[in-house]
Amino acid sequence: MNPILAARLEKLRERMTATSTDLVVIGPSSHMVYLADLSPHGDERPVMLMVSQSYAGFLMPALNADAARQHTDLPFFPWSDAEGPNAALEQLLDATGIDRSAPSVVLDETMRADFALLVLDALPGASRRFTADTVGYLRSRKDEAEEAAIKASHLLNDRAVEAAFAQLKEGMTESEVADFIKGFYKANGAETVFCSVCFGPNAAFPHHHTGDTKLKAGDAVLIDTGGRIGGYPSDMTRMGFFKTKPEGYDDIHSVVDAAVEAALAAAVPGVPARIVDQAARDVITAAGYGEKFVHRTGHGLGIDVHEAPYITGASETILDNGMVFSIEPGIYLQGRFGLRLEEIVIIRDGKAKIFSEMARTAVAAG
């Protein structure tokens, strides 16, 4: 087995011991990618990875077995459409060696409900919970190889965003800019994870759908985008303006940037994630825009662009070494513009380190 994956299974078993977990059951998801570097075709055919203290193996549709075998040497318990999965599932559960009378089972929260119920029906005495203190715990603490992959992804993203601002022209549509960024990713061996381009008042909608709005003088420009390379994504928001700044732009930019700095200073090991959210929110509230900051301060990033930890006002998650997450406060002025600045950071050496090397200063285009 790949040494990295073998080490992850070993660490998972350590977490299983620490949390009194007998069995971890993972569906076709980013959890499976993390543990087995396998992402089988997801449809209605049950496929799952089961890990106990003594065993790890797959329930695998025979239709997918040959393709999946290229990525893992863990044992398969295949089943055909004619047979159905039940007999193979029973064989896999027996192979795990768990006491089936009252096991403590962790279920992948992203698994299809019918897959999960198949497992629970086979283990009627089981207690169950989701992955937060096992696989999720491990995934939220990135190792040095993951850190390096995330850094490389962000350096490419810097280049993509800088190039996008540089080619803005009057009359371009948001979609044309997004297409340029997507083409930049592709030309540099990356794939697009998401790309949001917002001109003028559209930036006041935090989840605006990039469309046919044309760029004109006086527009604020928000670009929030991420590409994936080396298995890990980037995510960054930068602001600019076209030819002239909209009224009040400098003041709002200054407040949001100060909120980022406050959150960065608060993001240290041992503090609850809510303290980081509060630090950013306090700056914006003190400036009189508290009601205009309408979302959480951040989300984790890893194999998924959104994963634990979540930086919210209610989160009691304790920040720890290796955690990667966004800091992205914003102020949204309907009918005028919105302004968000986003950094992805990692907790290392007692502080938050930023992955991007692109300045947060407003980009003057045109």
Image (cartoon, grey):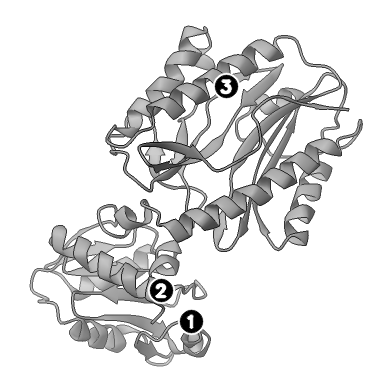
Q: Quadrant of the C terminus?
A: top right
Whether residue 80 is visible here, answered yes or no, is: yes
The residue singled out by tag 1 in the image is: 71
Name the residue: 19% across, 80% down.
54
Q: Amino acid at mark 1?
A: His
- Along the line of sight, the residue nearer the viewer: 46 or 57: 57
The residue singled out by tag 2 in the image is: 36
Name the residue: 78% across, 60% down.
187
Q: Position of residue 223 (x, y in %)?
A: 70, 36
In space, the residues marked 1 and 2 are separated at their CA atoms by 8 Å
Q: Amino acid at mark 3?
A: Asp
The vertical placement of 140 against 204, above or below, is below
Q: Position of residue 157 (x, y in %)?
A: 67, 47
The residue singled out by tag 3 in the image is: 257
Q: Amino acid at mark 2?
A: Ala
Graded by Cα atoms within 10 Å as few (under 14), some (14 to 19) or many (20 or more), the crowding at tag 2 reads many
